[in-house]
Image (cartoon, coloured by chain):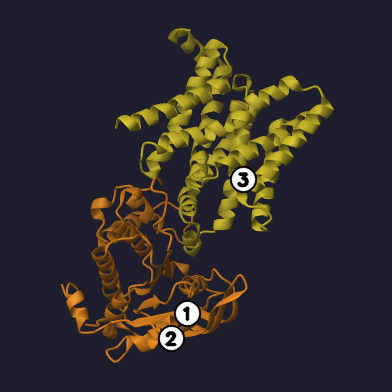
Chain colours: A yellow, B orange
Amino acid sequence: MTPINILNLLGYGFFQTALLGGVIAAAACAAVGLFLILKKEAMIGDGISHTAFGGIALGLLLGINPLLTALAVSVLSVLGISYMRRKNLAPSDSAIAVMLALGFSLGLIIISMANGFNVELFSYLFGSILTIDQADLLLVSLLGIIVILFLGFFRRELLSIVFDEDDSRVMGIPTNTLSLAFDLLVATTIVLSIKVIGTVLVVALLVLPGLSALQLNLSFRKTILTAVAFSITSTVLGILFSAASDITTSGLIVFTAVLLFLLTIAYKKLE
Amino acid sequence: MNTHEQTTQDTPILELQNVDVTRSGDTVIENANFTIAKGDYVGLVGPNGGGKTTLILALLNFLPRVKGTIKLFNTNIDKFQAWQKVAYISQTATSFDSKFPLTVRELVALGRIKKGNIARRYTSEDWEAVDDSINFMGLTQEAHKRIGQLSGGQKQRVFVAKALARNPEIIFLDEPIVGVDAATQEKFYKKLSDLNTKRKTTILLVTHDLTSVFCRMSKVLCVNKQVEIAEITSGLDPNTLLKKAYGEHFHFVFHRHECHGVFNNDTH
């Protein structure tokens, strides 16, 4: 495909919708993901995305928008993880494993019972940004704006908690409330990214851009902006090449993100 | 050479009455009674495992008390709200991940977050306080470096700068373990002395450096389950006090007249 063809593509409504949805999800994932990496809790992203799969299956079974049921189930799983931690029932990683197993097995049971929505399910597992409709774009944008506004307002407090939770508490930051709010934000981010990249690979978009940006040894401000820029770059490139080639979008997005990661490592070695 | 005696006023900032602190069912602090006044520079000493850190955490209301009352600024700690007057530097503060993406200035700026000021933009007043604190701690050259690039001594100072950015009235400092040489450590204590004398900040410092305590500070808290407090005056025999916490066999060689030789930079 020539550059001119890509320009033509940009004229299509469906393509603009896809790009917009992709950019919002990419920005939210990178910003939230950087905090997850710094908290050393990247696996909560993987856990919640698997739980979301259960929610999607439930939505398909009940005939409700699967993104809504995925959001509900993900929020419940975050609350479950937080409850298990607080009551000392399980350490963080084990609590995540329990919720992952519960959500995923629920999804499997529903699928085997319903036995009919394989094609649709596939689009949620691996994303289908090029077929996103206006209603889903609206939902993605709304959730994306919530995530980005929240981080805009509370980024310093969150950073402080990630860096030193005890000191943050002395400083008067409501650490428990903000930590829970942040976990809910992770759930929201994952759900809004499902259409773009799918539940299976969403963890890549959470982790890779932040990890790449961290290689560059920048200030926090520049690190988060770089992560967002990397994430948007890989998503836009992934969507463009996918539209031009008919190769799966999510695969290309993640592949580009991995390439960027390798490039930053190479850059660091050369420096 | 004890300048603290003149600056000490009698306004109590911290008062403990019959305080017991337990951790996992064991009584770690038993029947603590002491008062710390505005402008005090207090050395908290005692053997390892004697309860120094536990005492600090209790003073920050992190641990449940089984008995007694703690008052901060004349308010019962359970009702205390004015935490912006208090800064705390933990023992593990300096053992952060060296790749953490924060510059000195960004870290010190986090110190400006206060209750009631959550989720707001920094003002020019905030940044002035940040740069002033960085300057006071002698880190201006390092302001835009990442904290992971700092030396051990600079790491100790950057956390004090962060605490200072809040303009606290009292700093609880659980001496960070960074393994710095004696000269660097001495420079750090000198900075804390400056802070105490120039800004009248009350300091409660957990330390193993007994010479610094008896040369520089106004009071000593000796902790080994029991808590003893003494005003440091020329009449005080350190060993009488220290033996209560460290045991009878303990002997600390200390000659007050040597303080002037050791700390002769103080007058400049």
User: Given the current orientation, which residue lies at the most extreme right position?
Assistant: A113
Please tell me whether mark 1 sits on a helix, a strand or a loop. Answer: strand
| Mark 1 → mark 2, Cα distance in angstroms | 8 Å
Instruction: Give the chain letter at badge 2.
Output: B
- Above-or-below relation of A115 to B230: above
Q: Which residue is mark 3?
A: A184
Question: What residue do we see at 72% from left, 35% from top?
Answer: A104
Q: In the image, is B110 to the left or to the right of B62?
A: left
Q: In the image, is B198 to the left or to the right of A35?
A: left
Residue A242 pos. (x, y %): 54, 16
Viewer-proximal residue among A115 and B54: B54
Question: What residue do we see at 27% from left, 62% from top?
Answer: B181
Residue B244: give its label: 2
- Above-or-below relation of A261 to B171: above
Q: Which residue is mark 1?
A: B224
Question: What residue do we see at 47% from left, 33% from top?
Answer: A209
Residue A266 pos. (x, y %): 36, 28
